[in-house]
Amino acid sequence: MTEKVGTREKVAIVTLGCEKNLVDSDMMAHLIDEKGYELVDNPEEATVVIVNTCGFIDAAKEESVNKILEMGELKESGKLKSLVVAGCLTQRYKEDILNEIPEVDGIVGTGDFMSITGIIEESLEGKRPIFVGNPIFTYEDVVKRKVKEGTYSAYIKIAEGCDNACTFCSIPLMRGGFRSRTIESIVEEARHLAAQGIVEVSLIAQDSTNYGTDIYDGKLMLPELLNRLAEVEGIEWIRLHYAYPGFFTDELIHTFATNPKVCKYVDMPLQHSEDHILKRMRRPGRQTDIRALVAKIRAQVPDVALRTSLIVGFPGETEEDFERLSEFVKDIRFDRLGVFTYSNEDDTPASRLPDHVDEELKEKRANMLMEIQREVAGDRNGRFVGQVLDILIERYEGRNDIYVGRTQYDAPEIDGEVFVTGFKGELGTIVKVKITHSYEYDLAGEVV
């Protein structure tokens, strides 16, 4: 039988996919650390590797499988004794993983990752454990996470799962139905993160604007949550992701406009502009509703940065549809934009629709749309030149003797950065910087 703690197993967690997986990995890291195992960043040094997978679209599934196989090779070339696979891919394809990848020693689904230390122990004993049950999991009592040293921004899950049933999406199959956490548990997690040096929290859910309706008698509670989080000492920026447009209320817009800690940044996935495509996607609202909402947000929050994501090549999308989508992007002038090609996911209604678009054409349309956005983003970025902005300083690049940070208008890792000269303080500090140069997505400036 394996001696669990005395051997001081070294555990590395490799996280793929979205920010929600990062949160789960942080929570697993806390449990692993509490158990007495040593957490390491480099998988080649590890005796146990956990691959936290994504199973959302074909490209993500392929990346996950390749990473599992790559880590499995460490059994020959490294110190690896146990390879555990976690996350969305296991929730949908556990039998395939077990049958086709013999290097895997244990599996844990999206609703069972709190059992990770027991899974590690059993896998080291040669038992090949499988913990994949109902994905319905509540984060209500789980507020402790271990974030990496030198991290100043962290994601917080305010809800899990989704009830919207978009025809292209497999998230409900992997994460279950929509379920909110209480305000109290989210605030407590924010306090725990602030004690570890976190100054910015990004709120995430599959449908964040619907927050609270399932546990607070149908009331949309996101404005209340934002205001309560703003009271947490040490948290200076609160960022909102994945705001479903159908639940974006006047009260929420007012909170963005008036609460100084709420970043003037709205991440609102729209998926498409054309009404018949939105109907096929089973998305609520139509283009006129989207335009009216964007206009209202910009009128009340003039300095807001708008991010959206769009899908090109959805079944039935014609050349005319794509041209209208392109005109929509030019007209709305989003500050940030992500484009995805439609991925045909197993067991989704969209997979059974007629008129699928050729893969090569989907890629061509995505590239064309991003080229349009490149020009729009560069132009939008130019408005900051000459302004003094608050910048969160996150790292130092010694080679160029320059500090790098972000504005409130840029989310970590997915948006632009600011290259700062004249900074003398500590990392994790928010300072005022006069912007001197703008690029397509980034900025440069000097500390005031």
Image (cartoon, helix red, strand yellow):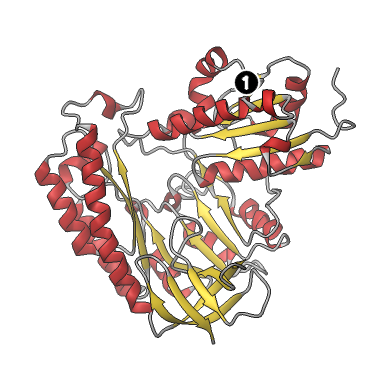
* Res 54 visible: yes
Residue reaching furthest to the right: 6
Q: In this figure, which residue is indicated by the disc labeled 1?
A: 104
Instruction: Pick the residue in front: 137 or 399.
Output: 399
Above or below, 67 relative to 229: above
Instruction: Pick the residue in front: 435 or 93.
Output: 435
User: In terms of image quadrants, where is residue 130?
Assistant: top right
Above or below, 2 relative to 208: above
User: Could you say where residue 177 lies in the image, as x and y percent from the top left?
Assistant: 47, 34
* Res 176 visible: no
Badge 1: residue crowd in 10 Å (few <14, some 14–19, many ≥20): many
Q: Residue at 47%, 39% (x, y): give it.
A: 178
User: Could you say where residue 91 lies in the image, as x and y percent from the top left?
Assistant: 52, 25
Above or below, 286 relative to 112: below
Q: Residue at 21%, 26% (x, y): give it.
A: 353
At mark 1, the secondary structure is loop
Q: Residue at 31%, 68% (x, y): give it.
A: 378
User: Could you say where residue 397 lies in the image, as x and y percent from the top left?
Assistant: 59, 67
Instruction: Pick the residue in front: 335 or 242.
Output: 335
User: Could you say where residue 375 lies in the image, as x and y percent from the top left?
Assistant: 26, 64
User: In terms of image quadrants, where is residue 382?
Assistant: bottom left
Above or below, 251 relative to 328: below
- Report the side of 339 relative to 365 (left or right): right
Quadrant the N terminus occupies: top right
- Report the side of 391 relative to 292 (left or right): right
Q: Residue at 74%, 15% (x, y): give it.
A: 126
Quadrant the C terminus occupies: bottom right
Residue reaching furthest to the bottom: 448
Q: Amino acid at mark 1?
A: Val
Residue reaching furthest to the top: 99
Number of numbered tags placed on the structure image? 1
